[in-house]
Image (spheres, rainbow, N blue to C red):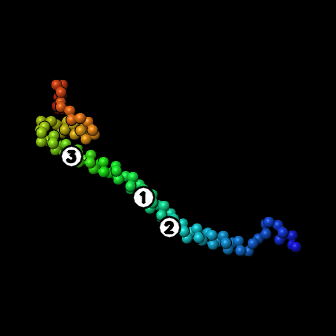
Amino acid sequence: MDRMQGTRFTMNPTLPFEMSNARDMINAHLFPVLGLIATASSVSIALSLRPIAEQSTRWNTCYSDSLAWYEANKPDWTIQDKEVFASNFCNGGVPVKPGAGFQLAR
């Protein structure tokens, strides 16, 4: 028996060929796998953002409607006052009647 054949460091002639096949398989499947991961991530992010987008749409509608109501019913108020009260109402605040100390912004 040859001394080099008995060691664990023997060179297997098929090893580079097998490594080449493994590397080729990884390279062949890398792009589709990364594409699948990117697609799944994008879908997950889009689904997570949907409730926020719906809430924003509702808030914008509320704000526009409140401003229109204040324009029609409180013509003597400045636009600043109308915006503050509309924002307060749409953020869940109680529609407050101006009290005795209320003064219009000038």
Q: Is residue 84 visible?
A: no
| Residue appearing at x 13%, y 37% in the figure | 74
The residue singled out by tag 3 in the image is: 64
> Which quadrant: the C terminus?
top left
- Residue 90: % across, % down: 25, 41
Instruction: Count residues near mark 1 (Cα–Cα under 10 Å), then give few for <14, some for 14-19, many for 20+.
Output: few
| Residue appearing at x 48%, y 61% in the figure | 37
| Residue appearing at x 84%, y 69% in the figure | 6
Q: Amino acid at mark 1?
A: Ser
Give the quadrant of residue 41: bottom left
The residue singled out by tag 1 in the image is: 42
- Which residue is the extreme one toward the top? 101
Q: Is residue 79 above or below residue 34?
A: above
Name the element at disc 1. helix
Is residue 27 left or right of 97 when viewed as pictured? right
- Which of the pair 101/41 is nearer the observer? 41
